[in-house]
Image (cartoon, helix red, strand yellow):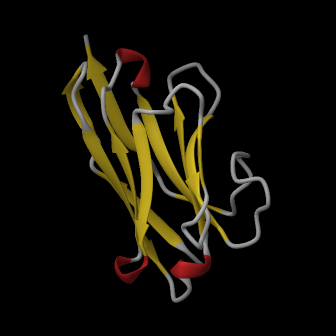
Amino acid sequence: QVQLVESGGGLVQAGGSLRLSCAASGRTFSKYHMGWFRQAPRKEREFVAAIRWSGGTTYYGDSVKGRFTISRDNAKNTAYLQMNSLKPEDTAVYYCAADNTIRALTSPLYDYWGQGTQVTVSS
């Protein structure tokens, strides 16, 4: 089993930056694909970014390309989401996810999910 805990959310002004962290428990973190999703009030969950276990391939949602960067540190069992040039429309609860067999990393079908961390961007 895998347990995920997000941290790093908070309140930031438009144009600012935040780095989210996702700490994972388990013995085989290095073999898990990792994803980030977000959900704003009264909206469906939206794909943000993903990275394969090898680290060689990344994916980004159209709304965050060029602004967000996903990375991972397998030695620390942690995935990161660096968010720059934040906009008010980025306000949402951000969730990390993990799966060792998922084929479509942009889909919301990951086996394991964290509880989420709130990101609020003021105008």
On screen, 109 above or below 61? below
Residue 21 pos. (x, y %): 34, 57
Residue reaching furthest to the bottom: 27
Say which quarter of the image contains residue 53: bottom right
How many numbered marks are there?
Answer: 0
Q: Is residue 25 above or below residue 98?
A: below
x%, y% of residue 109? Answer: 74, 53
Q: Percent x, y for residue 103?
A: 79, 60
- Above or below for 107 versus 78: above
Q: Which residue corresponds to the image point at 43% horizontal and 59% vertical from the top-left?
A: 71
Q: Residue at x 45, y 41 (%)?
A: 94
Percent across and percent down for residue 42 are 58, 19
Taking the spot 53% from the left edge, 80% from the top edge, the residue there is 30
Q: Is 15 located above or below residue 77 in the figure?
A: above
For this orientation, the residue located farthest to the right is 103
Relative to residue 116, is residue 18 drawn left or right?
left
Q: Nearer the viewer, residue 1 or 36?
A: 36
- Which of the pair 65/25 is nearer the observer? 65
Quadrant the C terminus occupies: top left
Q: Quadrant of residue 63?
A: top right
